[in-house]
Image (cartoon, grey):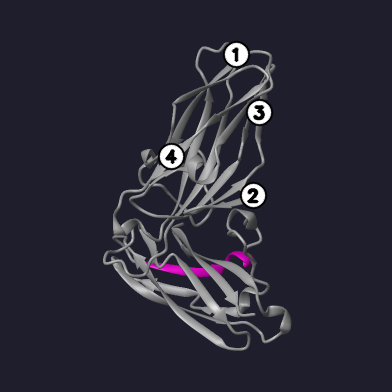
Amino acid sequence: MIYIKRCFLVFIVFFSFCFYAKSASLKVSPARIIIHDVKPGKLYDIYKETKVRLTIYNDDDMDRTWLLSVNQPSKRGDWEKGYSEIPVSTWCWFNNKTITVNKRSVSYAYLFLKIPEEEKYYNQHWIVTLGIDSKPGAGNLSLAADIRVQIETMSKCDISVKPHGILSMKPGNVIFKNVIPGKVFSTKVELFNNDRISHNYYVSSLFKQKSQIMGAYIGHSYISIPNPNWLAYEKDIFVQSYESQLVNISLLVPDHVENFEKRWEDILFIESNDCLTGFIRIQIHTVP
């Protein structure tokens, strides 16, 4: 796993997808990409900014051509709990729609991203699926891979409109800075129900849900909070249709020497009975 930071942060999982069929193979890396702090309105050349690109390997004895696509995960692929699918898949694109990889060689595909410059697109957690497919007409060859890209736009409190999405938060990320162990720190997050019906939402920590993959969420230079019970918040929240409610969040880190000069993170999942999900990213910096 490698973290790279330029104007924004990309977290790359460098496991490869490997598929084989009748002497043909498809191997791709990375398997997942997480992009933090994306600013709406800015064009990102992912490779230029971060040196991250999609690598496609050809271990076969003949050249292979692949089709590249960007998709909403409801149409293709899957996504991590708490993320929503990107509203428009064409906000993310490859430099080319096909790629040919010479025998016993590798080739690279380059990714671009631009979210429209609108206030409602701050505080978002989205997924987009990158598709790699065998080109039709290549005999018996029929292989495909899906790469998930987790896109988190900049967290911002002072927006004048409701954040995008049926379930949304303002801000999307909370940072407790200069935390002194032994003292209580508090903040608020506004939870928006942009649906035509009212919802009950349930709040819980990622680290109390053992079925979730921690590495899919934890950000650069952070480790998981040692005890999620150090955070206190409402566990059950009712929000009327097209209304919002404040979620009170407080933090009390025990006054022990090992709790100083730490960078911890927790993910608070927001869930409804009818499968709406979102999350608040909590980051904690304790003083030296």
> Which tag, 2 or 4, sits closer to the chain's start?
2
What residue does disc 3 label?
19
* Residue 213 seen: no
* Front in this rendered view, residue 165 or 108: 108
What residue does disc 4 label?
112
SS under mark 1 = loop
> Which tag, 2 or 1, sits closer to the chain's start?
2
Disc 3 packing (10 Å; few <14; some 14–19; many ≥20): some
Disc 2 packing (10 Å; few <14; some 14–19; many ≥20): few
Whole-angstrom CA distance, mark 1 to mark 4, is 32 Å
* Residue 226 seen: yes
What is the three-letter code of the residue carrying label 4?
A: Phe
Quarter the C terminus occupies: bottom right
Cβ atoms at labels 1 and 4 below 8 Å apart: no
User: Does 177 appear above or below 166?
Assistant: below
Q: Residue at point 61% right, 52% down?
A: 3
Cβ atoms at labels 4 and 3 below 8 Å apart: no
The boundaries of the magenta stretch are: 199-208
SS under mark 3 = strand
27 falls in the magenta region: no
SS under mark 2 = strand
